[in-house]
Image: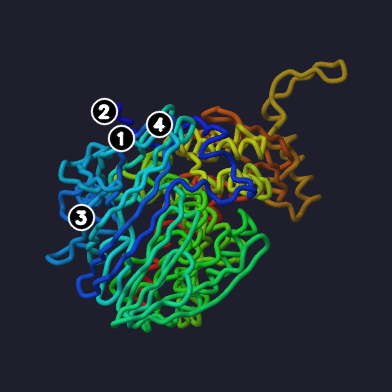
Amino acid sequence: MLPDIPFAAASAAAPQMPSAADAWGGERTGNQATLSDRVVSYQINAELDAAKHAVTGKERMTWRNRSDRAVSRVYFHLYLNGFQNEGSTWFTERKVLTAHGRSRGAAALKKGEWGWIDLQQVKQGDAALKWTFVQPDGGPATDQTVVRIDLAEPVAAGATLTLDIDFLSQLPRVVERTGWFGDFNLVGQWFPKIGVLELAGERGATAPRWNVHEFHFNSEFYADFGLYDVNLTVPSDYTVGAVGEQQGEPQTANGKTTYHYVQGDVHDFAWVAAKGYKVLDGSWQGPGSPKVALKVLYPPEYVGSAQTQLKASIDSLSYFSDTLGAYPYRTLTVVVPPYNASEAGGMEYPTFYTTDGFTKVEPGTGSQYSSDFVTIHEFGHGYFYGILASNEFEEPMLDEGLNEYWDQRMLRERGQNLDLTTPMLRRLGFAPSFTGFAIERLASGLKQPFDPLGENSWDRFSSSSYGTVYSRTATAMHDLEERLGKEVTERAFHEYYKRWRFRHPSAADLRATLIDVSGNAKAVNEIFDQYVYGTAHIDDRVASIDSIEVLPQVGSVLKDGKRAELDSGELDKQIDKQREDWAKAHPKAKPGSGPFPWSSTVTVSRDGAQVPQLLRVKFADGSSEDVKWNDDRRWARFDFTRPSKVVLATLDPEQKIYLDANKLNDSLTTKADGSASRRWSADVASLLQAFYALVGSL
């Protein structure tokens, strides 16, 4: 028996060493025969039993051994087994993580609603193979989401393996990401899929290793790029949509219709079959992209949102192609789940994603923002999860987090805020509006981050802590953009896409690209060290303002070669006289001004990580002065001697530092002033009040 190739560690997370230049076959220049280095191919013939929500399949998988050694065992994901019983890793983790935080996927499954994949036969040539369930991450022995298949003949270095697999996939009732409800079937993670054999120099690996994690509650997916050739047979009265391009006209016989889809240079395949669905068609083409055929598949109850989602998808194609790189595929399919199947919404696959349904989308209301945001977000996954293909198990920030950031950039460019109102409330003058990045900041858990952004998806304090991967990454990238500049940041991400498309980059590869393009290693490393690899928080505040009028002092002084002595009585008379004369000459002077200068001291304090700060002080006469606080002191004092005293001191006056956990202590005034709370009116309390007011009006 050949020595086993080890698993990627169960504690695997964001590596700190950049990948090798030749990782995954090197940069894809566009001169290669295919967009990706196709490691695997799947030919699948599948048929849906609509009454049972079950799929019978025959799969021929061809896989290339990229390593320098023979392989005698291969490992496959059987994701649907996460839903077969409560002994799976998925359900076991759900009990703990949702006990300390809120999450999607919390529905209970009843009798007849469980899901699984049964392997019926696996053959290598004429040899029937044996398989064993394994738990690479040390999960419960009852978890069957990863299977080891022992080969009859090893696969030599550089050689290919072909397996023929017969399987039955039972869809669960929709609980998370996949499943059925009524006559709707979202068929995702439904076929046996081989794990990724990573090589030295790829995502922190120092030797070949199998990256094939169990299906965790918070995790999504990771797979090799390849070619999919899939035939789908469904009842003829069902509407079908899938990853990739439909080949020719569907073939119908005996009440069943077979659809043929092919797509290369993707790493997954999903499809939908639903009765009574409608289709809205569209198209788009941009520089460097092929003409893209769009389809929105929707149930009749959500006809009101179909056109909105088509427009948001077309706008997303333009924005992401312009700012990251050309969209490389010819199709884009959008699926709106039916009422009561919302857990099937908000899920992404290459060229194919699901959104949320709305009976009516009102411009300038929360429904408009929600519809657009979900559609843009799921489209954006086509870049960060799809084309860049980061490892969602180990580095969810590279997909969910970066995607959330780029989505908010797009909404910012559109000038689109979250308007928490309705048409009726707007007529009454109630129309609170919040920017996307302000919302992300509020959801980021900045006061007490439990986990680094670069932590893997399942090793988290709670599901709520995992949820901050989205918002805290978006907030951290927002602040990094403020330090680097918008144009530099965009060039850096464009380069990241160019270097790492179709190649599975790591967080270290993102950091290296940002440094290379910006030339600002200090700013990039601060964000990565403090937030991606650490759990720092920022809370800088203005601690105090102290002002003293600079008056003549009692005692002996030497003036013009003569020594004179002033006592307090004489000095008081002199001061009073000067004040009277000055007041007569300046009848409209503001309080805090006078004939004598003022010495003011502003003290700032730091509770958390260092961040470059701008301090703006305002004086009683209306003038102001800016000073920079860009060092590692825990506190600092700044002295000002001016004709009038300091009346207001503000850190981050231009509101660039969203990572600061408490913005309300960034300002201090010598008299009551509500400017700080007005500037940061998107405080949690006011946001909730506005939200509940909206809900109560629906």
Mark 2 vs 4, N-terminal side: 2
Mark 2 vs 3, N-terminal side: 2
The residue that label 4 is drawn on is 208
The residue that label 2 is drawn on is 1
Q: Residues within 10 Å of mark 3 (few under 14, many from 20)?
A: few
Contact (CB < 8 A) between labels 2 and 1?
yes
Name which residue type carries label 4: Pro
In the picture, the quarter occupied by the N terminus is top left
Asked whether 597 or 69 is in front, the reply is 69
Name which residue type carries label 3: Gln
* Percent coordinates x, y for residue 540 in the rendering: 51, 39
Asked whether 603 or 385 is in front, the reply is 385
Mark 4 vs 1, N-terminal side: 1
Residue 431 visible? The answer is yes
The CA span between labels 2 and 3 is 26 Å
Name which residue type carries label 1: Ser
Mark 2 vs 1, N-terminal side: 2
The CA span between labels 3 and 1 is 21 Å
Mark 3 vs 1, N-terminal side: 1
The residue that label 1 is drawn on is 72
Residue 536 visible? The answer is no
The CA span between labels 2 and 4 is 17 Å
* Percent coordinates x, y for residue 64 in the rendering: 43, 42
